Image (cartoon, coloured by chain):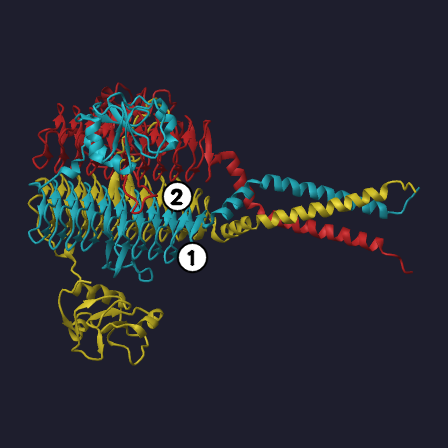
Chain colours: A cyan, B yellow, C red
Amino acid sequence: MAQKAEYTLRELADAVGGKVVGDPGRVVRGVSTLESASEDEISFCVGPKYLPLLEKTRAGAVVVPEMLRVSKNAPDRIAVGKIDEAFNALTEFFIPDYAKKMSGIHPSAAIDPRAELGEGVAAGPCVVVQSGAKVGARSRILAGSYVGHDVKMGEDCLIHPNVTILDRVIIGSRVVIHSGTVIGSDGFGFTRETPGHPKQRQLGTVELGDDVEIGACCAIDRARLEKTVIGRGTKLDNLVHVAHNVRIGENCFIVAQVGIAGSAVIGNEVILAGQAGVDGHITLADGVQVAGRGGVTKSLSEAGKYAGCPARRKSDEDRRVALTWRLPKILERIKELEMRVARIEKKAENDRKPHSD
Amino acid sequence: MAQKAEYTLRELADAVGGKVVGDPGRVVRGVSTLESASEDEISFCVGPKYLPLLEKTRAGAVVVPEMLRVSKNAPDRIAVGKIDEAFNALTEFFIPDYAKKMSGIHPSAAIDPRAELGEGVAAGPCVVVQSGAKVGARSRILAGSYVGHDVKMGEDCLIHPNVTILDRVIIGSRVVIHSGTVIGSDGFGFTRETPGHPKQRQLGTVELGDDVEIGACCAIDRARLEKTVIGRGTKLDNLVHVAHNVRIGENCFIVAQVGIAGSAVIGNEVILAGQAGVDGHITLADGVQVAGRGGVTKSLSEAGKYAGCPARRKSDEDRRVALTWRLPKILERIKELEMRVARIEKKAENDRKPHSD
Amino acid sequence: MAQKAEYTLRELADAVGGKVVGDPGRVVRGVSTLESASEDEISFCVGPKYLPLLEKTRAGAVVVPEMLRVSKNAPDRIAVGKIDEAFNALTEFFIPDYAKKMSGIHPSAAIDPRAELGEGVAAGPCVVVQSGAKVGARSRILAGSYVGHDVKMGEDCLIHPNVTILDRVIIGSRVVIHSGTVIGSDGFGFTRETPGHPKQRQLGTVELGDDVEIGACCAIDRARLEKTVIGRGTKLDNLVHVAHNVRIGENCFIVAQVGIAGSAVIGNEVILAGQAGVDGHITLADGVQVAGRGGVTKSLSEAGKYAGCPARRKSDEDRRVALTWRLPKILERIKELEMRVARIEKKAENDRKPHSD
């Protein structure tokens, strides 16, 4: 991992409000995992599960939760209250966050004079911002990204390179959108009954709540007339498809390659694991969790784990699948029964015959 | 929904050749759904199914099919012959279609002097059109899109932002391509038998018929030597994969996240629902409809509904799946039979034993 | 197929070290398939399987492997040692490879002065190369592509238009990346236990080995701390998702729409067919082959063919599925047994009754 600078353990501990155990003057020049760190690097032991790795690490220093009991011969360390926050803060010392540092509007960016950019907005090379768009303070739009007409974007958003945000889309604050993703493409609406299947204009929009994060190469379609909604705090992984008029609640996790068909309504705190699918016009209650590859074809009104296609309670589905694996045995038992019954029948037949002796 | 202007009901009715029932002087300032419209907005009641919503709407005016029987206390309205056309025409009064209005070549576009642009072609910021490309009259290429060497594009096409159309691709007229999509990427062809798996050059192209629409983030590979073809009027949703040498007929609907493997041949009026897959080198007859997540592994020579993976007639597949859900009951019945047979056998055994009394 | 030039059979044979059988002065003006070629075109008969097409072809000339026995009345031909190499070499005479010919840096490209471009590097319009990036000799970066800060790219790479390569990604030599693809997007990492699900910074990178090829619209996430790795010679098709910390071995084929979850380890020479999925934190041995739509949920420690979801040995899975199709028959056999057993029981009951005669 690239080493950018050097710091003493004391300096790093102070930066995260941690406590040094060991030599505060130890010099740290990089950050890595417990398995890979070398003597001038710092690493992280986030919980008891990783204590065996801590035993063997060659890291010169480690960061540990203050509650974690560590053996005496562990490396020099920083004990912290919140290990995840310390991780995020300390790694920034060594691994540059170029997006955070960018500033200003690149000369090759095409910003329409009728767009409004808030204070400290940054735009990279070949960025396009169209008329009527409003971008909130400190939002950063990286190279090649497109912000359409009348888009409204909140503050502190991070739009990675080559993202496409189409006309009238509404984006909250602190939203992160990864490269290749398209927000506000037309819903898949055609009049099947009419010859030539004329297109139904898709006039609604997409609204992303605060703190939403959308992965790479996702496609989120605009509603036909109103809004496709992704609620505050919900995170999408890569290559996810969200059709028109879908409403996703808050704090959901939608894992890679999931597809959600038109007008589906997803509650809060829902988890859809990888490659799952949700049919159109159905409702998933708060707290539903669908296993990978699950295909939900009917509304689910209770929280809990579901699996299979069509999806059912995970425990039922697991049992069903397990039983199909017992089919060879089941068939043998049927054959065995057939033989035994035949034997009984034959014997009865013989018993009934007149004795000829 | 953004209000851009105001019109009287009479003006709107005249624009679509409709008939006003009620106050022709009523002022309309926006458009919305029956559920959400306010008193200065117009809405649409497209058929009898929506009459209950019409009863409750607060919309100041509505558009209805002239055949639809509406209660007397319905809002002021415009009766029209074709409700879908009226929808498309009237909504344009209130919701701007920026792509339709764009014109000219943006100064940041890189148009090769050896490319030919027809009359009225528009190109947005950072558009690239390479040498030998021919773009038909009135086609619009939005920001950041790429049109490769020797591409032939018809008239009145709409290429959304950040689309990639690679060398020699052939595109009909009135074709719509959504953002993030790639037309003419190399087919997945390597010589597996040779060490290092050398690449087989992919020299063919892709041909999209007139009135084709391709969703966001799709990948359509070029043929090895000839053409990957998508027939006139066929519509693709988002994140669809079409491999090299595939031929898709006319007026098909290919729903989101479908994958079609190399050299498959799809008939006309075929529907592949979301996340379905079609194996390579097989043929689907006209009118085949594959359910969501269906996986077609063999040619289907008759129209009709198919489901499952491997896909079979939908009715058969549904029955098969239903029976697997009865496996617990089936197992109980087998156990019961085993007990009864054992009882019979035991009794017969006892009967046969010599009495020792 | 566009004809760019004309050559004699002798000239073409010399170019690939082949031997002319027939008229060396025959003029060739294009290349096509055996089915479609016309009299002034050359075609390829790569093996005995295609001899029936060779019988019927109207091609003026053909290229054949020198080992192939061809009928006397076959067209004039070039016999070659390696048919695939001859195909790649000869087709270049007729179908221009514009990417190969491109040179120089387009004036609209934004190349940071702190980036290092090797000798002969070419960059198309609107390409962005950020500070600290190093691009090896003769690599070509096509229009609209983004090369982030500190990226390291080897020699002779081909980056198609609108590709996104994010900060610190490491790319070998002769790597090909197709349009719409994103390398180095953030892994999907959030702390689920903490309210608000704070993001875990994704600080690692992605490393693509030499001769890797990545299809269109793929998303390859960076590791949290170390590297997501795709080994030398491995080929990915379109719309593939590779999550953070995944390690894929050498010479694998990952077919379209496959998803590989976080920290999975894939061996060498593995084949994952279309729409397959691999769960996180599991290991697939060298030589594993997963059928299309297969979903691997547990580590597979032996080479061989697997199928189904959850994936098992393909032969077992095929048998399981076949047996589920026999469930209607199985149910009939159970009913039949139940009737026979009831008959036996009834008869035994009757026999036991005291005779009242």
SS at mark 1?
loop
Q: Chain of mark 2?
A: B
Amino acid under disc 1: Ser
Give x and y (percent) for residue B118: 11, 49
Residue that appears at 32% across and 39% down: B243
Give x and y (percent) for residue C205: 25, 31
Residue C168 seen from this side:
no
Q: For mark 1, does the 10 Å Cα neighbourhood hold few (<14), some (14 to 19), or many (20 or more) residues? A: few
Total numbered labels: 2
Left or right: where C345 falls relative to B237: right
Are the residues under badges 2 and 1 in a single subunit? Answer: no
Provide the residue designation for mark 2.
Answer: B278
Amino acid under disc 2: Val
Residue that appears at 12% across and 26% down: C116
Q: For mark 2, does the 10 Å Cα neighbourhood hold few (<14), some (14 to 19), or many (20 or more) residues? A: many
SS at mark 2?
strand
Left or right: where B157 falls relative to B347: left
Q: Is residue B199 above or below residue B155?
A: above
Residue B342 seen from this side:
yes
Give x and y (percent) for residue A117: 10, 50
Q: Nearer the viewer, residue C192 or B291?
A: C192
Residue that appears at 23% across and 28% down: C170
